[in-house]
Amino acid sequence: MKKFFLVLSAVLLATFLFSFFIAFDGSTSKLFLQWQSLTRDRPSLPFSAYKTRRVKQSNIEWKQPNKILFVDNHLFWKGKGAQALPELNSDGEIVSFVIVDGGYGYSDSVKAIAVGIHAENFSLGNPIVEKGKIKSLPILRPSMWYHEPLAFVKDESEPFSGVAESILPSGQIILETPFLMGKYHGNVLKYTTQGIPVFSKEYNKGEKHGTHIFWFQDPLDPDDYKPTKSKSGELLPSLWAKVKDDAVAKFGTRNIGSGDANKWIVKTYRIRGGEFQVQLLEHWKDNKRHGLFEGFDYLGNKTFKDEYKSGLRIKHKTFDKTK
């Protein structure tokens, strides 16, 4: 029996390897790219595009949501004001159009044009016009309908999943923006040219959701820090300088400004007693202000405290720091 399972395992392994070489020409990079494509909308899966893909911010372009334009080609007068809204199935595909406003003055030479994301996939019939009003709009070939702008990598047909980075010539990342299927999703992080955190904003599928924090841009060393020297003998007058020097040893000079290095520096600085003074603290839920909104001055004194519930401010208090 044991021998049987060994033979079966060997056969299955051989079959997998043969299929791998046939499908991907034996290239692990092709396999990885295919896996990224399949996991665009699966952020929890290992090695998904959301977790592993990183592109330059300059390669991101925003495409606008879909809408229908009615173009009257009559020579002497042209209709105006018609509006059509889509009815969608559970998969987001158009079932029909509802004419919410037929407009006025339309001739029989009206064309309907779909614009926006993947508009080329639509095929529409000629609008039905009665007494100058648009009455209905036939669909010859349906497609997905998108209600909001989405981010794409240039020359790619699917919304982007991954992290877009703004990088200085020095290699320092100053902005990390995570996307899931073209929408902000995760923690948007901004840094100064020195790697000091500027803000952290949490998003969920395009909506502000969670904590948004804005910091003053001067690290606050612990009182008990004593200047030390680097391995090269250079004096490190602050804990921030010390942690940055340790990061060079850990990540290398070329990677000191990378996303991983930025996060490690900030985390290590805090663990060793350093702080970043909060300037503004916000809480959001489903794109609405929900929870505490607090402001602070450079010395840590609170300047105001508001409380929101589902977008409505229910409490407000200001603080006079001179008292």
Image (spheres, rainbow, N blue to C red):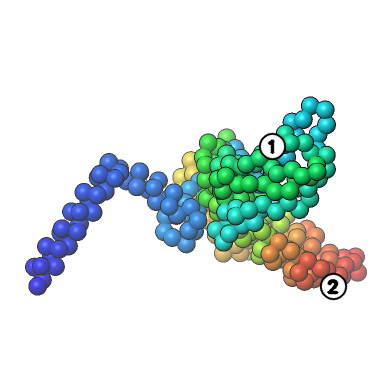
**Most foreground residue, 107 or 103:** 107
| Numbered-mark total | 2
**Most foreground residue, 179 or 305:** 179
Which residue matches tag 2?
315
Relative to 102, is 164 on the left or the right?
A: left
Relative to 92, is 288 on the left or the right?
A: right
In the picture, which quadrant includes the C terminus? bottom right
Q: How far from the left and from the top, in percent, is residue 128?
A: 70, 44
* Residue 187 seen in the current view: no
In the picture, which quadrant includes the N terminus? bottom left
* Residue 279 seen in the current view: yes
Q: Quadrant of residue 278?
A: bottom right
Which residue matches tag 1?
111
Q: How far from the left and from the top, in percent, is residue 267?
A: 56, 60
**Most foreground residue, 102 or 307:** 102
Residue sitting farthest toward the top: 75
Q: Quadrant of residue 59?
A: top right
From mark 2 to mark 1, how far is it between C-alphas? Answer: 53 Å
* On screen, residue 65 above or below 213: above
**Most foreground residue, 218 or 168:** 168
- What's the amino acid at mark 2? Lys
- What's the amino acid at mark 1? Lys
* On screen, residue 119 above or below 271: above
